[in-house]
């Protein structure tokens, strides 16, 4: 049993998603968990006009999910997604395990700043900004 870490970008039918956001997104997540996968993060990414029509739709809702899954089960969920009427498109990408922490933090919209950068910023201190220069000129006069 080889477990992989995957990113999947889903393109939902905006009409289906608008009527039942929890149900449409939940169905996608349930397919993964029922196959024995573990959801790391799953969230709305964007809702926008498409560059070209897909299945007659001009607008779509993008949903981003990171998950762990047995590689052999990927075909099973791929087939389930092909049959899902709410999905216009989807794409799986296998993720290098060394990158997963940064990608999940970014998907959760957490800012990840290395400790060295934070310490370097504190050591520099406060510099003179444009507003400070105006104050200095006013004091000199």
Image (spheres, helix red, strand yellow):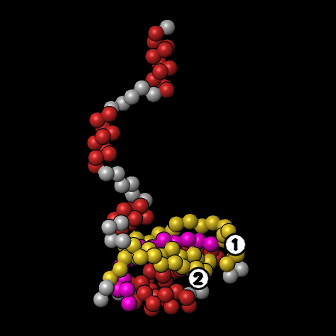
Measured as percent of width and height from the top left, residue 79 is found at: 51, 91
* Magenta part, dominant SS: strand
Q: Which mark is residue 52?
A: 1
Q: How many marks?
A: 2
Place of residue 54 in the rendered image (x, y in percent of width and height, measured from the top left): 67, 78
Please tell me which residue lies in front, 6 or 141: 6
Magenta-colored span: 60-72
Q: Quadrant of the N terminus?
A: bottom left
Does 76 appear above or below 123? below
Residue 103 position by quadrant = bottom left
Q: Which mark is residue 122?
A: none
Q: Residue at x 36, y 55 (%)?
A: 112
Q: Quadrant of residue 100?
A: bottom left
Q: Secondary structure at mark 1?
A: strand
- Of circles 2 and 1, which is in front? 1
Q: Which residue is mark 2?
A: 86
In-front residue for pair 99/76: 99
Q: How many residues crowd mark 2 within 10 Å: few (<14), some (14–19), many (20+)?
A: many
Residue appearing at x 32%, y 45% in the figure: 117
Q: Where is residue 90 shown, x and y percent of the image?
A: 54, 79
Q: Position of residue 93 (x, y in %)?
A: 45, 76
SS for callout 2: loop
Q: Residue at x 60, y 67 (%)?
A: 47
């Amino acid at each position: 049993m080889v477990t992989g870490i995957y990113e999947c970008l889903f393109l939902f039918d905006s009409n289906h998603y608008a009527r039942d956001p929890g149900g449409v997104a939940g169905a996608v997540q349930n397919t993964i968990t029922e196959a024995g996968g573990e959801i790391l993060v799953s969230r709305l990414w964007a809702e926008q006009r498409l560059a070209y029509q897909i299945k007659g739709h001009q607008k779509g809702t993008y949903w981003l999910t990171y998950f762990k899954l047995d590689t052999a089960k990927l075909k099973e969920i791929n087939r389930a997604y092909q049959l899902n009427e709410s999905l216009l498109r989807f794409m799986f990408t296998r993720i290098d395990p060394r990158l997963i922490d940064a990608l999940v933090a970014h998907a959760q919209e957490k800012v990840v700043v290395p400790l060295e950068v934070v310490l370097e910023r504190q050591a520099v201190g406060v510099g003179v900004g444009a507003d400070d220069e105006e104050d200095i000129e006013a004091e000199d006069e």
